[in-house]
Image: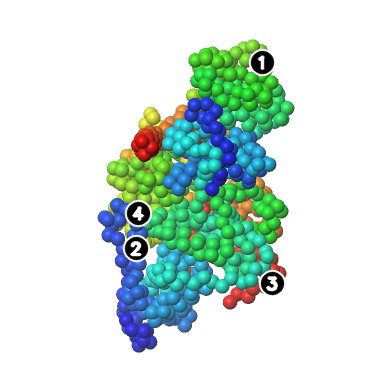
Amino acid sequence: MYKIVSARFLAENIKMFEIEAPRIAKRRKAGQFVIVRLDEQGERIPLTIADSNVETGTITIIVQGAGKTTRKLNLKEAGDTILDVAGPLGQPSHIENFGTAVSIGGGVGAAIAYPTAVALKEAGNKVITINGARNKDMVILEDEMKKVSDEAYVTTDDGSYGFHGFVTQKLQALIDGGEKLDFVLAIGPIPMMRAVAEVTRPYGIKTVVSLNPVMVDGTGMCGGCRVVVGGESKFACVDGPEFDAHLVDFKNLADRNRMYNVHEKAALEHFETDCKLEKQIQAQASN
Amino acid sequence: MSEGKMGKLSAKERMKIHRHEMPEQEAKARCGNFDEVNFGYTPELAMEEALRCIQCKDPVCIEACPVNVKIDEFIGLVAEGKFLDAAQKIKEDNALPAICGRVCPQEDQCEQVCVIGKKSEPVAIGNLERFVADYERNSGNMKLPEVKPATGKKVAVVGSGPAGLTCANDLAQWGHEVTVFEALHELGGVLMYGIPEFRLPKQIVREEIDNLKKLGVKFQTNVVVGRSVTIDELMEEDGFDAVFIGVGAGLPWFMGIPGENLNGVYSANEFLTRVNLMKAYDSNYDSPVFDCKGKNVAVIGGGNTAMDAVRTARRLGAEKVYIIYRRSEKEMPARIEEIKHAKEEGVEFIMLNSPVEFVGDENGWLKGVKCLKMELGEPDESGRRRPVPVKDSEYVIDIDMVVISIGNGSNPLIKQTTPEIGTSKKGTIVVNQETMQTSKKGVYAGGDIVTGGATVILAMGAGRTAAKAIHEELMNVTVNAE
Ligand SMILES: Cc1cc2nc3c(=O)[nH]c(=O)nc-3n(C[C@H](O)[C@H](O)[C@H](O)COP(=O)(O)OP(=O)(O)OC[C@H]3O[C@@H](n4cnc5c(N)ncnc54)[C@H](O)[C@@H]3O)c2cc1C
Ligand SMILES: Cc1cc2nc3c(=O)[nH]c(=O)nc-3n(C[C@H](O)[C@H](O)[C@H](O)COP(=O)(O)OP(=O)(O)OC[C@H]3O[C@@H](n4cnc5c(N)ncnc54)[C@H](O)[C@@H]3O)c2cc1C
Ligand code: SF4
Ligand code: SF4
Ligand code: FES
Ligand SMILES: [Mg+2]
């Protein structure tokens, strides 16, 4: 059992948790993740370790309610527990002083881009962050990003805040403005990562993406998380999750991530019906 | 049957008794559930079967058992109806008889050499072992072994498969403080996530683990050694005096043919883990698995894992289930019983066929397997006739889901973080066969991580050998083999 010591929403549907996991807190490096199982009936899902504190023995995760498991997790509060938390898993981000490094986070991807931005800064890079969201209310970690960045940008799809447009447009604008970029990290929805790869490809800028295939064990045992990189199959949980963006087969990743869509939709519908029923029962009981 | 009958029957009379097959669920019924296929012997059946053993002066069966269970003696006790004594006799050499009785490839081991088998069917040693273990468990008289006084030494066991569990069991009995570290949330290794419920009920594995807890063994799940903690840290910071590595052969091989990453293509590990460990067959559990209902499923390979996967797909409602294997049935490494059960359950065996491509649709879903027909040529190094392709024989079988079950390599996590531990080209850990010691002092290894994918009983044997060597190193003593 792993205790949640704090929990709060950062934006609609995006919640940050601090969880007691001293062993993981001690060893974890930027780019690594945990596998979480909420309860006996639960599935195992990967979540990036956004931060950790060795003194308090806690790790931070930031969760977007995407389907049943993440929504169920986001109902938890401080004091609640999670049955299983295993990690740190995956290869730590490859960090060096590249020169000028851009860290791009789309949506909840900012949670994953953030720890790597911190590590890039510590390694002596000039760090530029681009934090993309649908609208103003969905921007997360703005202050944190600002703190570690030499230049911090926020983009919104609807223009309600910061730069009006996609993160790729901002990236292109930086390149067009004459900024010499040595390294780009992009984390977010698959179409965004693919688009970033296409922006940097013609300039030969080293670009890394953190891939999010469906995982089970997270230890290299099942092969379910395999992704195609440079024509070869790689297990994202042990060989990744970060890979050279210019070599990733994004179509295959997108196809594979749809493998359980029918189950996922049904699971979410059941879950929401159950939640509504529970509320109705509670309401009736208090009447 | 009376107790005295054993002495009264002559060897000749005993030879006349036919082998008692185990009662089992009828094939059609069992395709619709995950309950155990075999029901086990009744006491009467067991005693009658035990009478078939002629109590050889030189019991060759014992030599053929990797842990040298005193087969003649325990069967003698069964014949006399002394089932609890028989259980104790087996446990002198085998800590997990309820499991081995179910999954050992007896036809290649103890039963292969049984002298009765020369004239008729061998004594059903495995069935008897299983009966005795179940009898003891159900009797409520499960005896815990004696634990020696505490030595003050601490040993870490990495991995909770049969190798790790056996090593932990023996070390605890010597009086050492043992902690088992397991990467997954559930203990038992392949016994839990690989071998399905219908062949090995998980309750049995759980009870064996509970017994280890009663002996004082501690368990920590969710610890991925190499990531959560390294072997060096275990020894230097956490104060473990020795480490046993029993992490199994958990890195699935794929075939390297086109279409392998289509949706609907699984490794056996993933498919079986989703179904067994994550209980995807039960709608109360959240983990999804491909919906096999009414679909065509093919499993590629011919081992126990392949049979488990194909029979699992059948139970999930698949319409047609195939085994595709590139050699002939004679060469299949699976236990004979599994092949027989698979056939009874309607699995079609497509022999001498080698998949060359997985064919998909535009959305990335599997729709067929392109196979090349093979014929048997000259024998290869292993003495098995080598399959050679038949020219222009390619054709496509309509398939909705495929499970690749062609074996496992070694997981590199520990190797990556503890490079002093010597490994072979294949990635298996190299050990001294007498002691299971690795090239790093105080670190031992055994089971599939050393041998590559093998058997439960060999993994247990390795765990036992290592436990003895660890005890000798820690206490600076020599333990005589009994
Ligand atoms: C290495 C890695 C790090 C991640 N870090 C974060 C993070 O920090 N914060 C965050 O909010 N999300 C993160 N994710 C994504 C997160 O794991 C999924 O959103 C979550 O598993 C969805 O589960 P669900 O039941 O809520 O939704 P579902 O409705 O079941 O699934 C929604 C979508 O999520 C993906 N998904 C489903 N099951 C899994 C699974 N077992 N493993 C991976 N993806 C799955 C599929 O593409 C699916 O279509 C990460 C994923 C990976 C691989
Ligand atoms: C589907 C299937 C069916 C089989 N059927 C039979 C059969 O009928 N008869 C038979 O004799 N054999 C059978 N086998 C083979 C047999 O199960 C194995 O040979 C045996 O389980 C090996 O035991 P082990 O202890 O070495 O490893 P495993 O059983 O593989 O256990 C290793 C354990 O270590 C854990 N682990 C791995 N890495 C780490 C790490 N870094 N840190 C912590 N823990 C870790 C794993 O999660 C696992 O729990 C079958 C195998 C499979 C897959
Ligand atoms: S442990 Fe296996 S090989 Fe040994 S006697 Fe029992 S069934 Fe036979
Ligand atoms: S070889 Fe067969 S008959 Fe002889 S002791 Fe062993 S089991 Fe009994
Ligand atoms: S999640 Fe199973 S191998 Fe990566
Ligand atoms: Mg889900």
Q: Which residue ends up furthest to the top in the rendered image?
A: A177
Task: Confirm if mark 1 falls within 8 A of ligand 1.
Answer: no
State if disc 2 and disc 4 touch (CB < 8 Å): no
For residue B4, side relative to residue A77 (left or right): left
Residue B287 place in picture, x, y as percent: 42, 43
Q: Nearer the viewer, mark 4 or mark 1?
A: 4
Chain where mark 3 sits:
B
Q: Which residue is mark 3?
A: B477
Of the two numbered discs 4 and 2 in the rendering, the one whose residue sits closer to the viewer: 4
Query: Which residue is painted at 36% across and 77% down in the image?
Result: B47
Disc 2 crowd, CA 10 A, few/some/many (<14, 14-19, 20+): some
2 and 3 marks on the same chain: yes
| Extreme-right residue of the structure | A124
Please, what is the three-letter code of the amino acid marked with disc 4?
Answer: Phe
Q: Is there CB contact under 8 Å for labels 2 and 3?
A: no
Q: Are marks 4 and 3 on the same chain?
A: yes
Q: Which mark is residue B415?
A: none
Report how far apart the C-alphas of labels 3 and 1 lie in the structure: 70 Å
Which residue bears the numbered disc 4?
A: B34
Where's residue A43, x and y in %?
A: 45, 43
The residue wearing badge 1 is A179
Q: Residue at x 43, y 31 (%)?
A: A255
Question: Hey, what amino acid is under mark 2?
Answer: Asn
Q: CA distance from mark 4 to mark 2?
A: 12 Å
Calculate the distance from the C-alpha at mark 2 to the C-alpha at mark 3. Answer: 44 Å
Q: Within the image, what quadrant is residue B333 found in?
A: bottom left
> In the rendered image of this protein, does residue B322 appear above or below residue B61?
above
Disc 2 sits on a residue from what chain?
B
Q: Is residue B335 above or below residue B324?
A: below
Q: Which mark is residue B38?
A: 2
